[in-house]
Amino acid sequence: MAYDEGLAHRLGESLSGLPGIDAKKMFGGIAFLWHGNMLVGVMGDDLMARVGPEAQEDALSQPGARVFDFTGRPMKGWVLVSGEAVAEDEALEDWIGRCREFVEELPAK
């Protein structure tokens, strides 16, 4: 499955100043890991956002967000966000911030 390279590039640029960021091909797309923990990624035309279980309900209420059920079972703490919903840099930065809030509390791998 191909992924939106433009969105991946935008994520890479936005995260480039954050120490401990690595990009890795996963799920037929690309994921950005922060100190070894998945933070965000791109699958198809969508943003994969790791917001954590407690923030998932609020995240799902945001425009373009839906349950991430890549495996056929919903992934707890993750949402998919349509590429259209993160077309503007401000919206993308908001989602990155949501993800950082959760992932920065995780121990490094």
Image: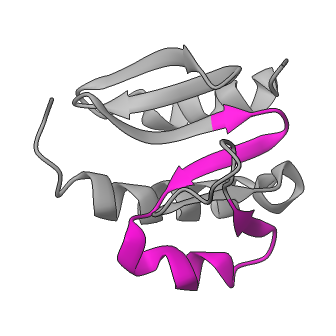
Determine whether, in the image, residue 52 is placed left or right of residue 70: left
Q: Position of residue 2 (x, y in %)?
A: 85, 18
Determine whether, in the image, residue 22 is placed left or right of residue 106: right
Magenta-drawn segment: 42-67
Q: Position of residue 42 (x, y in %)?
A: 68, 34
Question: Could you tell me which residue is drawn at 45 percent across and 65 percent down?
Answer: 98
Viewer-closest of 3 and 14: 3
Q: Is residue 69 above or below residue 46?
A: below
Quarter occupied by the C terminus: top left
Residue 58 in the magenta stretch? The answer is yes
Q: Position of residue 83 (x, y in %)?
A: 83, 49
How many numbered marks, from 0 up? 0
- Colour mapping used in the image: one colour
Q: Is residue 89 above or below residue 107?
A: below
Q: Is residue 3 above or below residue 43?
A: above
The quadrant where residue 21 appears: top left
The quadrant where residue 19 appears: top left
Question: Could you tell me which residue is drawn at 78 percent across and 45 percent down?
Answer: 46
Q: Is residue 24 above or below residue 66?
A: above
Quarter occupied by the N terminus: top right
Question: Could you tell me which residue is drawn at 64 percent across and 26 percent down?
Answer: 27
Question: Could you tell me which residue is drawn at 67 percent across and 28 percent down?
Answer: 8
Determine whether, in the image, residue 63 is placed left or right of residue 109: right
The quadrant where residue 52 appears: bottom left
